[in-house]
Amino acid sequence: MEYDHLSSLRRSHPAWRLLGADTAPLVIGFLHHCYVQPNVRTLSEPELSARLDDYLHHIRQGLAEEALPRAPLDYLRDWASDSRGWLRRYYRHDSDEPHFDLTPAAEQAVQWVLGLQQRSFVGTESRLKLVFDLLRQATEGSQSDPEVRIAELQRRRAAIDTEIEQVRAGTLPTMDATQVRERFLQAADTARALLADFRQVEQNFRELDRQIRERIATHEGAKGDILEEVFGERDVIADSDQGRTFRAFWDFLMSPARQEELTSLLEGVLALEPVAELHPDPRLKRIHYDWLDAGEITQHTIARLSQQLRRYLDDRVFLENRRIMTIIRDVERHALAVRETPPTQLPVMIDEPSPNVSLTMDRPLFMPPIKPHITRQTLHQGGADEVPADALYEQFFVDRQRLTMHLRQALQTRRQVSLAELLQDHPLEQGLAELVAWLALATDDGNSVIDESHPQTIDWIDPQGRPLRATMPSVIFTMDGSIA
């Protein structure tokens, strides 16, 4: 926090410029109303302009006529200019209308102003417990001594057993209304703050994409130089603490089981009476879908980075191929020109485009040929009656269309179905071959789940009447899968 650094931030940082602007109350209030409070990621230009028009109309009623004289669209374009940097104006790939998104710097300013407001309820117990839990996780997660880890797990197991015994004895401790409200408010603040993290990660990759475009436009050297530099910087971002955390968060959020669990938890918490008394924002019930939309935009930014590199490589390959074809055409034209009058004196005649080097050490050592040893024996001619031909007529095939039809009928009344449930309604008719066909259907379907951690047992009767059993991983089919 040196003086020179702070002076530079005051001149160049968009968040500081916003806090010092004359129209800061208008900008911060409007951005909080349209983006931060409703957890909105992006808005089109007509929609955002209409909202700003309504917002200005309510503000101008209490001000002088000459206050805030500019049109809504002029304000938006001014806030999105390079001199302001409070909004990002861009075109989406699926729309020809401009869209506006909040920049990370502007969101920092809005969050800082929100922190100035006096809170009617300040929770400390849950945050203190959160500090203890985080420190405990960091200590236990970095512990490499097995004995220490086992001792800690045994201590936790003893505490859980004690709690179970207390519940069985009738002692059922529950949180009071204050503790429930405190934890809910902290969870809601953390959930809203995640969108700011998505914006910052996307901004980092967007800046990298802009730098790559500038370097490609001015690069004159070999492809390997710029690719090494670009991939090196991309790996630095992806392998940084922020990149690893985002990747782990995205993998955790993309799990269908985690999404269902989070939906159930949100519905259960919002239904509690202490939480309902706070009149929470109903949009919190679908906050994880807002995370998915924001994360998808970040993934598109990363995809554009890879697309830019691929386009650069295609352009360079095209130019190199065109140069090679030009050289070949020149050689052909020169060959045709000297075909009738070949040169009479040539100092050197080259038969091959490159010398053929044969090194002595490249020759393999001598190996004596292997002589096969043939045992002399008399071969008897067999008859047609000695070889049974029944096996030729006992061939069968598993009809995958019949299995697909059974699966689609089952998914008409439920979102997902396991293989064990399917086999209860439609037992195996062709034994192990039909079971393998079910596994092939699950493997071809990208949305099906094969859980090796939860094995299941399948029983069936073979044509000879013998009971057979197979142990295999659990297989779950979902209604979103593309069953071929």
Image: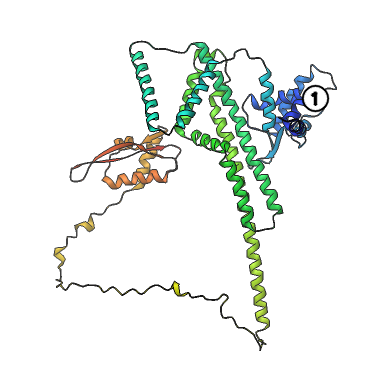
Front residue of this view, candidates 311 and 74 = 311
Residue flagged by tag 1: what amino acid is it?
Asp
Count of number-bearing discs: 1
Picture colour scheme: rainbow
Image position of 6 (left or right of 239): right
Q: Residue placed at 59% from the left, 43% from the top? A: 236
Residue 265 point in image, percent of width and height: 47, 23
Residue farthest bottom in this picture: 344
Q: Quadrant of residue 405?
A: top left
Q: Quadrant of residue 421?
A: top left
Image position of 165 (left or right of 245): left
Q: Residues within 10 Å of mark 1 (few under 14, many from 20)?
A: few
Q: Residue placed at 14% from the left, 64% from the top? A: 385
Residue 434 point in image, percent of width and height: 30, 46
Residue 64 point in image, percent of width and height: 84, 18
Residue 270 point in image, percent of width and height: 51, 18
Q: Which residue is mark 1?
A: 22
Image position of 469 (left or right of 232): left
Front residue of this view, candidates 477 and 141 = 141
Image position of 459 (left or right of 144): left
